[in-house]
Image (cartoon, rainbow, N blue to C red):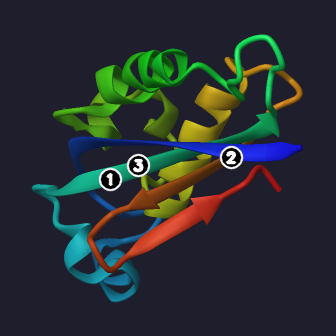
Amino acid sequence: MKVTVHRKAHFNAAHRLYRKDWDFEKNNKVFGKCNNPHFHGHNYELIASVTGDIDPETGYVIDIKVLKDMIKTEVEDAFDHKNLNEQVPEFKDLNPTAENISVVIWNKLKTKLNKNHDLEVTLYETPRNFVTYKGE
């Protein structure tokens, strides 16, 4: 019997959407105000969803405290109050779009999970704009 456990978290971070190989005009046309050379920030909301079998001994799919601590270490400590472009190594050469951020988070968390667990990451950049990544 598969059950999904969800943990919500948040972090605040700044970023700039642009490509180094494009001039300012092309970046501005594609990314608009998100291309601000002085950066801009978001209050990101994250939902990490872990699906797996219920352990007959504990009754857990995953101990929620373990998931909470994993998110704190891998995401909140790494991204919170940071400039993603300049302070987070994963975005040195990767545009920190919501899509790319969700994939980076998924990769960081998936390596820490039991291989039998499925992971889905939902990242809200704003209350109305969000992405989901399942590792596909």
Drawn side of residue 134 relative to residue 63, left or right: right
Q: Are marks 3 and 1 in contact (CB under 8 Å)?
A: yes
Q: Residues within 10 Å of mark 2 (few under 14, many from 20)?
A: some
Residue 104 visible to an observer of this rendering: no
Distance in Å between CA atoms under marks 3 and 1: 4 Å
Which residue bears the numbered disc 2? 4
Which is nearer the N-term, disc 3 or disc 2?
2
Name the amino acid, label 1: Glu
> Which residue ends up furthest to the bottom in the rendered image?
29
Distance in Å between CA atoms under marks 3 and 2: 15 Å
Instruction: Return the x and y of residue 62 as percentages of the image width and height.
Output: 66, 24
Name the amino acid, label 3: Leu
**Is residue 51 placed above or below 114 in the rendered structure?**
below
Which residue bears the numbered disc 3? 46
Instruction: Return the x and y of residue 106 as percentages of the image width and height.
Output: 62, 40
Q: How crowded is mark 3: few (under 14 residues within 10 Å), some or many (20 or more)?
A: many
Instruction: Return the x and y of residue 136 as percentages of the image width and height.
Output: 83, 56
Name the secondary structure under disc 3: strand
Q: Which of 80 and 84 lies nearest the eye of the viewer?
A: 80
Which residue bears the numbered disc 1? 45
Quick one: quadrant of the N terminus? top right
Name the amino acid, label 2: Thr
Instruction: Return the x and y of residue 19 as percentages of the image width and height.
Output: 44, 61
